Image (spheres, helix red, strand yellow):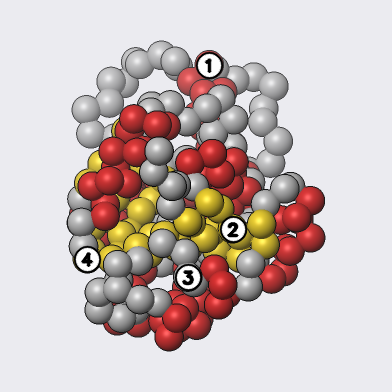
Amino acid sequence: MSRPPSLALFGFGAFGQLLAPLLAPDTRLCVCDPARQAEVQTQGYVPADLRDAARSEILLLAVPLAALPGLLAALAPHLRPGQVVVDTCSVKEEPARLMRALLPEGVELIGSHPMFGPASARTGLRGAQVVLCPLRGRGWRRLGAVLRVRHGLQVIVTTPEQHDAEAALSQGLTHLLGRAMAGMGPAPRIRTRSFELMMEALSMVAGDAPEVYEAVTAGNRHVAPLRARLAAALAAPEAPGAAPDSKAG
């Protein structure tokens, strides 16, 4: 039996803690997060400093976009050809640019975006989407196969540019609407089932960390034009094609 690969998880926040139990059975896992060393040990994982963690075969970066440049710069001197570095940021163009610019040649690079989080993963991951953006090397093929076969995920392979263009609508506007609706006050007593379903969906992003909201709204260049289109649509006197006598659903 082949030895499982060594994997270093950088970041042990809410998302890192979601990933750790999924990764541990198939890898020799260590966790690097100086601010949460006690939590790492309490939950039974191996803590590691940056230099030791950087020796792993696979480096999974579960840190906010704002922390990525500093982490990449700190890792770069310790990396060697053949290692695989994977980021998990909610946008992909800027992480791709940073990894290509800051990490040495010979290190394989994969942009990834798991389209789930602690709230949406409560009922399991099978059937959930994960986006892979191959940047350098071929390690993404093996990773994609493991995610499909081992975890039952739907793997979407695309470019960072295409990811951000599509995620601007599916994720960026969702977060904007979630924040806007949260500011409307408590849910009314009189409401339709469609309203309840909409609020249930928006509540799934309400608990996301502020840095996630900032990344998916301000960190994605495709969101601003969509926000402008949404504002124009809301200001229109009547939605195109709307039936004047349509009933509430």
Type of residue at label 4?
Arg
- Residue at image position (63%, 73%) is 49
Residue contact at pointers 4 and 1, CB within 8 angstroms: no
Q: Secondary structure at mark 2?
A: strand
Return the residue at label 4: 136
Residue contact at pointers 1 and 2, CB within 8 angstroms: no
What's the CA distance linking mark 4 and mark 3?
A: 19 Å
Residue 239: image x %, image y %?
A: 29, 35
Return the residue at label 2: 30
Which mark sits nearer the N-terminus, 2 or 3?
2
Q: Secondary structure at mark 4?
A: strand
Residue 189: image x %, image y %?
A: 69, 22
What's the CA distance linking mark 1 and mark 2?
A: 45 Å
The tag on residue 193 is 1
What's the CA distance linking mark 4 and mark 1?
A: 47 Å
Q: Can I make out residue 86 in this image?
A: yes
Return the residue at label 3: 55
Which mark sits nearer the N-terminus, 4 or 3?
3
**Quadrant of the drawing holding the C terminus:** top left
- Residue at image position (25%, 79%) is 105
Type of residue at label 3?
Arg
Which mark sits nearer the N-terminus, 1 or 2?
2
- Mark 2 crowdedness (10 Å alpha carbons): few <14, some 14-19, many ≥20: many
**Quadrant of the drawing holding the N terminus:** top left
Which mark sits nearer the N-terminus, 2 or 4?
2
